[in-house]
Image (cartoon, coloured by chain):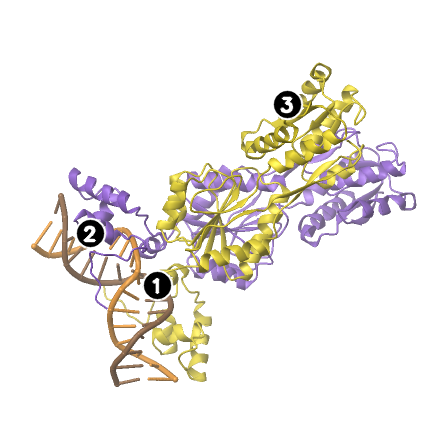
Chain colours: A yellow, B purple, C brown, D orange
Amino acid sequence: MVQLPETPTQHSVPTSTDVARLAGVSRATVSYVLNDAGTVRISEPTRRRVRAAAEELGYVPHAAARSLRAGHSRTVLMPAPSFPAGPLYSRFIDDLQRALGRLDYTVVQHGTAGPYGERAARAWAELRPVAVLVPGPGLGPQGVRILKRSGVRAVVTFGPEVVEGAHALLMDHACVGHCAARHLYDRGRRAIGVVLPEDPALEVFSLPRLDGVRRALHGTDATVTELPLAHDEGAAARLAARWDLLGLDAVFAYNDEYAMLLSRALKDTGVGIPRHTAVIGADDLMLGRLLRPRLSTVHIELPAGRDLATLVDRAVRDPRAAPERRTVLGARVVPREST
Amino acid sequence: MVQLPETPTQHSVPTSTDVARLAGVSRATVSYVLNDAGTVRISEPTRRRVRAAAEELGYVPHAAARSLRAGHSRTVLMPAPSFPAGPLYSRFIDDLQRALGRLDYTVVQHGTAGPYGERAARAWAELRPVAVLVPGPGLGPQGVRILKRSGVRAVVTFGPEVVEGAHALLMDHACVGHCAARHLYDRGRRAIGVVLPEDPALEVFSLPRLDGVRRALHGTDATVTELPLAHDEGAAARLAARWDLLGLDAVFAYNDEYAMLLSRALKDTGVGIPRHTAVIGADDLMLGRLLRPRLSTVHIELPAGRDLATLVDRAVRDPRAAPERRTVLGARVVPREST
DNA sequence: TTGAAAGCGCTACCAC
DNA sequence: GTGGTAGCGCTTTCAA
C-alpha cells in the first residue's frame, strides 16, 4: 500500500497539500497566500508560484473543512416556504438574498416544506448555519431552541406569529383583510363575502385575512360570509350559480387571481360588477389593471431586502440582544372600477 | 488556560465528545449508537444511556465534519435560475426537490444569479456537492471542468444547449414557437407577429421561441414580425395603436401573460380577436381560460421530477458514464377561441 | 462489547 | 519570510 507522494491518484480532488507540494512550499504558506493573510509577509515570487500551482491543479478550497476549522460559517439558511410562492414573495426573497450576498453571507435555500417540526429544525441545525430565516408559521419554540443550541446565532421568522426566542418580522395578513373590508364598508356595502381558497397551504394567509375582515366589521351592521373556493373554473361557476341566494353585495376575493376567477364566473352568470356586487382582490398584480372593470385591490408592501439583511447582520453580530419584533407588512387599498 | 473538562463553556455547541462524557462511554460508541451501525453490537443499556445523553444535551451532529470524514456528501446543489421563475418552473423545481429528497439527497438552492461564470462555478465547488443542477444556459465547459475537478459527480443542465461534459436535459423552447406558428398557419394566418418581452432575462426563452416560429414558417408565404414589448400597459397600448400599420393577422404573444396584456390593448383599440387578429399565448395558465375570447395557448410539458431524480441518481452512481442528452420539453397547442 | 487513535482539509499559533 | 503542528467534529479500523 505504498503510494508515491509525488503521484496523486489521477482523479482525486486537489487539496492545499497538493498545491503546496507542486509549489514547493508548506500548506501554511499556501493558506496564507490564497487568503491574503495580512499578518504575514510572503515574498512575491512565492506568492506567484503558489497561485500558479493552485491554478494548474484547479484547486478550490473545501468550505466545510474551512468552517470546521474556523468554528463558524457565513451560511444563512432559508427553508423553502410551505406555501406556493407567488410573484410578490419570490421578488421579496430574491431581493433579500441579494442584500445578504452583499454583506458577504452565503444564502442557501433548503427544500423542506413545512410544517417545520423538530425533525426539520434538526436537519437545518446539522448544516450549522449562522442564521436561519423561516418563512411562514410552523416553527415552534422547541425548534428555535434546537437551532440555538447548535450555534445558530440568529433565528428570524417571517410570519403571523411571534415565536419565543426568535426575531420576528410580523407579517400579519389581517391588515390586508382589514383594509379591504373597511373600503367595502365605506363604499356602502354591507353583505360581504370573503373567498377562502381551498388549498390548505394558503390558509396561512386566508385565515388571517378573513380575521381582519371580521375585525374591521365588528360592531357594525355588516355581515361576513365565508366562501370556500377551489382554484378552478367549475368551482367558481357553481359558486356564482348560487350568488342570488347568498345575497351579497360585495366580496373580498382573497387575491387578484381568485378575484379574476370569481369575476369571470359572476359576469358569465349576469351579476353586475360593481353595480350588483363589488369585488376587491389583493396583491396588486398587473392582471387586475387589465380586467374590465379594472379590479380594485389591496397593495401589499413587503420590507426592503436591504433592511432585513441589516437586521439579520445585527442579530448575528450580537446574538444575545433581545429578539426584535417588527411589523413589516404594509397594506393599502388601490381603488379601481370594481368597487 | 486550564479548563476543567467536566465544565464545558456555558454556551458552547454540544459535540459527540460531550455526549460520550455524559453517557460515560467513548466517542466511538456514541457514533455507533446514533448511526445505528450494523456491524457492531452495543448493549441495550448503553444505547439507552447514549440516546438519553444526546437528547439531554440537544446534540445535533455536524454535517460538515461528517462529510469531511466520509469524503463525500449527498448534497445536490441547484443555483437559482437567472430568469424570473414562473409558476410552471416553480412547480417543476418543487417536484424535483421532493423526488430527490425521497432518494435521500439534500437539495440546496444557492442564490447566485447567472451568468454562471467560473466565479460561480468555484463558489459552488467549494460546497463539494455530489451533483449540480444548473437551470438555463450560461454554464460553460470550463465551469463544468472546475466542478468535476472538485469531486462533483454529476453536472446536469436544464437549458437550450449541450455543455461539454455535462448531462443535458434539453429544453428547447423553439418547439413552443414552432407549434404556435404551425397552428396559426393552419388557421390561414399569414402575417404573424411575435412578441419579444423586453426583459433581457426572458431572452433565454423568447429568442428560441421566435426561432421556432421562423423555422416553422420558413419556405412558406407567411411573414414574421418581431414585436418588442415591455410588461406594462402603456407599452401595450402604444403597440396596439400602430396595429393597423403593422398589417398583422395573428400574433404569438410569448406567453399567456403577455397575451393577456396585448389582448387587452387590442380590444381597447377595437381590434377584433380572432376576427381581425388571432392571438395565441403559451404556458396554459388558468387565466387564459378566463379571458374572453378564451385564449388559445401552447401547453408546455415539463419532465416529471421523479424521472429527473432517477437520472441524477444514476449519474451520481456512475460518474464515468457518457453524458446523457435528453430532450424533455413537450409542447402542444390548446386551441380555444382566440385563434 | 467497548475504547484508542488516525485522519478527512483547513487555518493560526509559534518557532526557526 | 516560511514551516511544523495542533486541532475543529466526526467515523472507522484495530486492539483489548
**Is mark 1 in CB contact (under 8 Å) with mark 3?**
no
- Mark 1 vs mark 2: tell me if same chain: no
Question: Label 2 to label 3, Cα distance in Å?
Answer: 59 Å
Q: Which residue is mark 3?
A: A227
Q: From what the image shows, is residue A311 above or below residue A236?
A: below
Q: Would residue B145 be visible to someone looking at this image?
A: no
In the structure shown, which secondary structural element does the residue marked by tag 3 occupy?
strand
In the rendered image, the quadrant that contains the N terminus of chain B is bottom left
Q: Would residue B251 be visible to someone looking at this image?
A: yes
The chain letter for the residue carrying disc 3 is: A
Q: Amino acid at mark 2?
A: Arg
- Residue B32, image x, y percentages: 23, 46
**Is mark 2 in CB contact (under 8 Å) with mark 3?**
no
- Residue B266, image x, y percentages: 85, 39
State which quadrant residue A26 falls in.
bottom left
Q: Which residue is mark 2?
A: B21
Q: Which residue is mark 1?
A: A69
